[in-house]
């Protein structure tokens, strides 16, 4: 059972929250980066989350049609087959989907899973993200209510982002400013609209200065201690300790102390993309520089097939990314926590 069932995914998240660790959520854009993520989890003996953004799904759909649903479904089906060879459990998730892409991405994918569940099967994806951070909070939560009801009926967990994350990802851009900090009032309005589990389980991407990408020191001020304020503020009103399952966005480049504080305050999932992209590409660049005259047919020569064969540099890329995934597991305390 390498792809989590709905019950197992809930168990994974519960175990993470109780144990104060989090799962790395690794963005993938190909079968090769999927294998790299799976390998990293397996080597760390950690369960994890594999996710596909709208841009990743479009890339997976092929540059002829660039169909996001086709790309996401194809990789999910592939993952269901190849993950069986890895001795860990993973959940499949779709990352950042803004309002203008809901009809072409998340809603059709939820419908596909609903059809599977109606036939007695498990959903294709275990969770989907609604990124309403570019909308006002009222509109964001109204759409969140509708999607949560549909997701819950299909045994899917919804992830919601209620306030902006800075930087840029797949065309969604937010400035780095004081709006990158979720308030207790924002959290209370979220609980009122989406409930605290009785309307369906959701993950909450609250903002505490998070920024997508990697920036030089001083440009980003993370305040993960703010998550404690949100937990206590909402928990006091509803009589429920630590009511939220938080997601850490913009996790690449964060310090170990920032991560540790976030884990103590209810983070169960942390997204990694920028760091794993670099870890995948860096060995390829090294290979190309070292074998310049082999990968190119210079001055009428024939080059060296062994060096331009995609398998030669692809294996290095997979190993580099897998190593970064194992490091993420260590930072997030998920190493050795796989479900037996």
Image (spheres, rainbow, N blue to C red):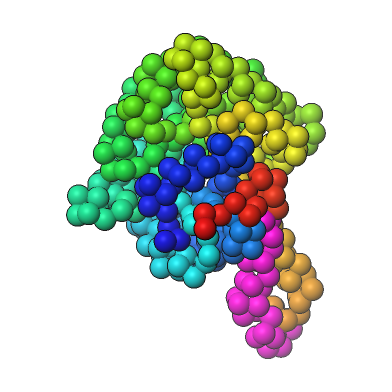
Q: Quadrant of residue 81?
A: bottom left
Q: Which residues are magenta?
A: 299-326
Write the residue at 28% across / 43% down: 154
Write the residue at 40% across / 36% down: 158
Q: Is residue 315 left or right of residue 119?
A: right
Residue nearer the viewer, 102 or 141: 141
Q: Is residue 230 left or right of residue 67?
A: right
Magenta segment's dominant SS is helix
Q: Is residue 263 above or below residue 272?
A: above
Answer yes or no: is residue 224 visible: yes
Residue 43, image x, y percentages: 64, 63
Instruction: Please say whether residue 320 is one of the residues in the magenta stretch.
Output: yes
Q: Is residue 271 left or right of residue 151?
A: right
Residue 260, image x, y percentages: 70, 35
Most extreme residue toward the front is: 340
Answer yes or no: is residue 176 visible: no
Instruction: Please say whether residue 165 is one of the residues in the magenta stretch.
Output: no
Residue nearer the viewer, 127 or 33: 127
Residue 167, image x, y percentages: 62, 34
Q: Is residue 191 above or below residue 73?
A: above
Q: Quadrant of residue 102?
A: top left
Write the residue at 41% across / 24% down: 196
Q: Quadrant of residue 152?
A: top left
């Amino acid at each position: 059972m390498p792809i989590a069932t709905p019950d197992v995914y809930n168990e994974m998240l519960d175990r993470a929250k109780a144990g104060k660790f989090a799962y790395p959520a690794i963005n993938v854009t190909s079968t090769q980066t999927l294998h790299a993520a799976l390998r990293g989890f397996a080597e760390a003996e950690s369960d994890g989350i594999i996710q596909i953004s709208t841009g990743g799904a479009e890339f997976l759909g092929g540059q002829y049609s660039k169909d996001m649903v086709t790309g996401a479904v194809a990789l999910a089906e592939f993952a269901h087959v190849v993950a069986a060879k890895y001795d860990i459990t993973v959940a499949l998730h779709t990352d950042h989907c803004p309002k203008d892409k809901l009809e072409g991405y998340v809603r059709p994918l939820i419908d596909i899973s609903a059809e599977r569940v109606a036939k007695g099967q498990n959903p294709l994806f275990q969770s989907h993200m609604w990124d309403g951070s570019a909308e006002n909070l009222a509109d964001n939560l109204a759409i969140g209510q509708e999607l949560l009801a549909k997701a819950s009926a299909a045994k899917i967990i919804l992830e919601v982002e209620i306030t902006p994350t800075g930087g840029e990802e797949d065309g969604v851009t937010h400035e780095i400013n004081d709006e990158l900090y979720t308030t207790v009032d924002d959290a209370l309005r979220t609980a009122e609209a989406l409930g605290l589990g009785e309307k369906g389980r959701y993950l909450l991407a609250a903002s505490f200065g998070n920024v997508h990408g990697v920036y030089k020191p001083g440009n980003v001020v993370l305040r993960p201690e703010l998550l404690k304020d949100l937990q206590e503020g909402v928990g006091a009103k509803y009589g429920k300790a630590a009511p939220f399952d938080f997601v850490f966005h913009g996790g690449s480049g964060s310090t170990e102390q920032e991560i540790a504080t976030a884990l103590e305050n209810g983070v169960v999932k942390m997204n990694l993309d920028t760091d794993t992209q670099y870890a995948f590409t860096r060995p390829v660049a090294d290979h190309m520089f070292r074998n310049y005259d082999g990968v190119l047919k210079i001055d009428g020569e024939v080059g060296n097939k062994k060096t331009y064969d995609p398998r030669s540099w692809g294996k290095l890329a997979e190993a580099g990314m897998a190593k970064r995934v194992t490091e993420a597991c260590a930072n997030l305390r998920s190493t050795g926590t796989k479900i037996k």
